[in-house]
Amino acid sequence: MNTTEPSPKNTASPNTGSDTFDIGRNGSRASHTRFLGFLGFAVLLTAVFIKPLFSLTAGAIHSQLDSYIVLVPFVSAYLIYDRRKRLPKEYGFSLWAMIPLLAGIIALTTALKLHRPGSSLSDHDYLALMALSFVCLLAAGGFLFLGRKWMTAAAFPFAFLIFIVPMPDAMADTLETASQLASTEAASLFFDITGTPVLREGTIFQLPNIVIQVGQECSGIRSSWVLVLTSLLAANLFLKSTWRRAILVCFVIPLAIVRNGFRVFVIGMLCVQIGPAMIHSVIHRRGGPLFFALSLIPLFLLLWWLHRGEGPRKGTPETEDLGASPAPPTGGSEESSRT
């Protein structure tokens, strides 16, 4: 009898390629489902917190201190959109979700427990706790649906959402007092440098024809806080090394103090040179944006200097051109060059 053994070619499954395609397609569908699940979770969470979020937005629009909050979600959304090509396309589950989940539950429980008639918790602090709970729970959803790798890649845009949490009353009062005292010292230094005759008692300056006092409303805490946010964004967008980013952000503290002190000095000199009526002028009542814009000049100059020190980024045409070495000449061309 003649037995015919099957050819090895016939043992291979003709559907191997299609099976591989099906696996890849199923993985893509699973990732797409997890991403849609996160979007659905974000929408549901927003619906649950819609009342405190609406109250926070309405209050921020008319607030002298918290008006920047309205822009924070849009900035975070833009940063994520700008990084969309660098974000992982595969999602997963991470137990790191437990940390923001626990923090969110604690903040929510504290807000609901203490926000009662006659409680010491103010409405402003209640909204701060609710906003903190919202951000923490949203981060927990990110770890649950998108995974640790995705959240790590989007760490700064996601962490920037923390600035929708308004300053608690105690924090705002402390910073205002500190800024008030520091601005007084800076203004006194400007008066001394220019040789302006002045008598000082605490935060009160007695000038030749007027007495001015640096109040808490003159502390410039709002513009200083916005300056901090600006430096964080600029450092993340334009600088790569951690120490350069730290230098830029830390530079904001003395810059804000000098700016506030300079504003007090300018108003005082206007009252001395022109008249006491300048205390009610536009530069005093509405001059904050002008001095804020002036403070951006040294900030951006420092940013330019730090960015220049980093050199061209890897992968840019300048780096590739500098790193490329010319190809060695062929034998014929080498002989021709020798002749």
Image: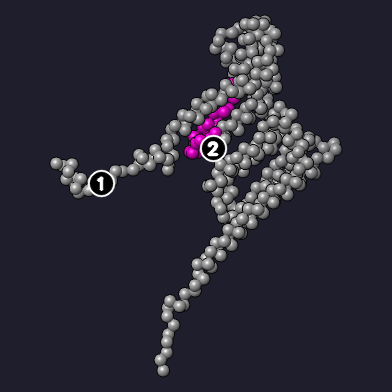
Image quadrant of residue 128? top right
User: Which label was assigned to residue 253?
Assistant: none
Residue 108 visible: no
User: How many residues crowd mark 2 within 10 Å: few (<14), some (14–19), many (20+)?
Assistant: some
Q: Residue furthest right?
A: 117
Q: Which residue lies furthest to the bottom in this view?
A: 1
Q: Name the residue under label 1.
A: 328
Q: Point out residue 163 in the picture as x, y percentages from the top left corner.
A: 65, 37
Q: Which of marks 1 and 2 is in front?
A: 1
Q: What residue sits 56% from the left and 53% below the top? A: 89
Q: What residue sits 57% from the left and 35% below the top? A: 233
The quarter of the picture where the N terminus appears is: bottom left
User: How many residues crowd mark 1 within 10 Å: few (<14), some (14–19), many (20+)?
Assistant: few
The answer to if 8 sits in the magenta stretch is no
In the image, is residue 212 above or below residue 59?
above
The answer to if 240 sits in the magenta stretch is yes
Residue 197 visible: yes
Q: Please name the amino acid that badge 2 sits on.
A: Asn
Colour scheme of the rendered structure = one colour
Q: What residue sits 16% from the left and 45% below the top? A: 335
Is the C-beta separation of discs 1 and 2 under 8 Å? no
Image quadrant of residue 59? top right
Q: Point out residue 183 in the picture as x, y percentages from the top left corner.
A: 62, 20
Q: Point out residue 261 in the picture as x, y percentages from the top left corner.
A: 61, 18
Which range of residues does the magenta coloring cover? 234-259
Number of callouts: 2
Q: Mark 2 points at which residue?
A: 236
Q: Is disc 2 placed on a helix, strand or loop?
A: helix
Q: Point out residue 228 in the picture as x, y percentages from the top left corner.
A: 60, 31
